[in-house]
Amino acid sequence: MEGREAIAEYLQDEFPFLEDTGVLSPHQGGRSAGLQRLEQFQLEKYGKQRNFLDGEVGRLSPYISRGCIELEEVRQWALKRGKSNSVEKFVSELAWRAFFHLVYKEEGDRILKDMEKPKVSMRQHQTTLPEDIANGETGIPSMDTFIAMLKETGYLHNHARMYLASYIVHFRRVSWRAGADWMYGLLIDGDFASNHLSWQWVASTFSHKPYIFNRENLERYAGSVLPGDPRKGDPFNYSYEELSERLFGSEYQPERSRTSGSYR
């Protein structure tokens, strides 16, 4: 069987219950495609652009998570590019992925529960994902855009995943497990350990503080690819001190990150 179209037709015949959108995934599978993407990656731009949604990132995760290319060969490829901030930042991200896998290997299904006591109260968090989030109908254009990207392509920039996870867990008070399971089911690069432990990192059950963002941060890093949100009733348009008070109460006093203008 040759060609993506022929494979798509075969899969549709074999699994007729799957929705046929008539559009092939933008991600072409296989080792050759993965290696080609690796060579196209402009690593020298990564250090300064990686947090921006329109910046240069690897987009290698679909190939790494499916075993088309190995994490170690990607690391070696990067190290051969010399010493630079971009190489250091990229290899650090690869190390986080390896770390999450080591935690999963050691802890197994315990990663499905809080690894640590949450640093903020989660007693009132819902245990099921609200339908408006699942349908991308929250009424907040930026979050609905992220959800649409996820459902249409199976992929989100890492910073967009953090924004969406933070919105779901902290702004909407939904359990991280409900959000993590939902996102994992939609990701074309779904990596169980990285996904669920990253959600715990956002929630503060696998980190020393919760991850939150405000309007300034969202517009700085994602504004170029997002529609504007209505200012009336904007849940993000506060200082970090005000957001912390609104979301967590006066007992929690986080420290401000020096790197991305957000709390991490």
Image (cartoon, helix red, strand yellow):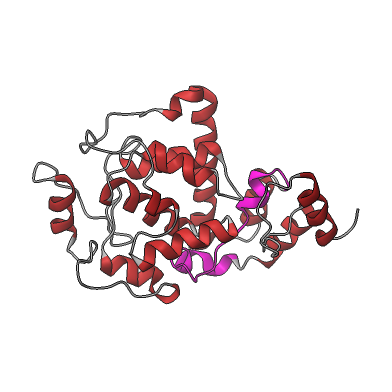
Instruction: Confirm whether residue 84 shows in the render.
Output: no
Residue pictured at 26% horizontal, 34% vertical: 118
Residue 112 in picture, x, y percent from top left: 44, 29
Q: Nearer the viewer, residue 174 or 247?
A: 174
Residue pictured at 61% horizontal, 68% vertical: 42
Q: From the viewer's perspective, is 195 left or right of 27?
A: left
Residue most toward the right?
1
Q: Nearer the viewer, residue 91 or 166?
A: 166
Residue most toward the left?
250
Residue 195 versus residue 123 in the image, above or below = below
Residue pictured at 34% horizontal, 35% vertical: 127
Residue 30 in picture, x, y percent from top left: 77, 52
Q: From the viewer's perspective, is 146 left or right of 241?
A: right
Total residue callouts: 0
Residue 96 versus residue 79 in the image, above or below = above
**Which residues are drawn in magenta?**
43-68
Instruction: Confirm whether residue 157 shows in the render.
Output: yes
Residue 104 in picture, x, y percent from top left: 51, 29
Q: From the viewer's perspective, is 200 left or right of 17?
A: left
Q: From the viewer's perspective, is 12 left or right of 201?
A: right
Residue 181 versus residue 85 in the image, above or below = above
